[in-house]
Amino acid sequence: MSTYQMLAEFAQVWGLLYFIGIFIAILVYALAPSRRKGFEEAARIPLRED
């Protein structure tokens, strides 16, 4: 196995794990019960009358 193939495989595996971790962190942030009030308030912004 050449050095290039080893580096490419390393980058693919760890890159995938990195993005899965980021995705899970975003899900935890978005679905956390403590954030619900802020997100519901933000969802009503377009419906407010000026």
Image (spheres, grey):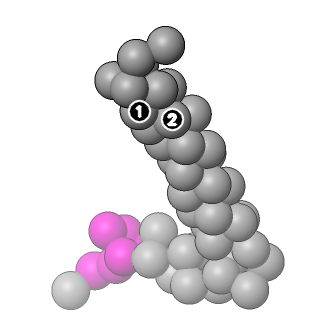
Residue at image coords 54%, 51%: 18
User: Can you say whether 23 is above or below 25 in the image?
Assistant: above
- Dot 2 surroundings within 10 Å: few (below 14), some, or many (20 or more)? few
Q: Which residue is mark 2?
A: 10
The span picked out in magenta is 44-49
Q: What residue type is disc 2 on?
A: Phe
Between 34 and 25, the residue placed more toward the observer is 25
Q: Amino acid at mark 1?
A: Leu
The quarter of the image holding the C terminus is: bottom left
Q: Compared to 21, does 37 lie above or below?
A: below
Q: Is the C-beta separation of discs 2 and 1 under 8 Å?
A: yes
Q: Residues within 10 Å of mark 1 (few under 14, many from 20)?
A: few
The residue at 56%/84% (across/down) is 38
Q: Which residue is mark 1?
A: 7
The spot of residue 24 in percent (x, y) is 67, 55
- Whether the magenta-drawn stretch holds residue 5 is answered as no
Where 23 sits versus 49, above or below? above
Q: Secondary structure at mark 1?
A: helix
Magenta-colored stretch includes residue 47: yes
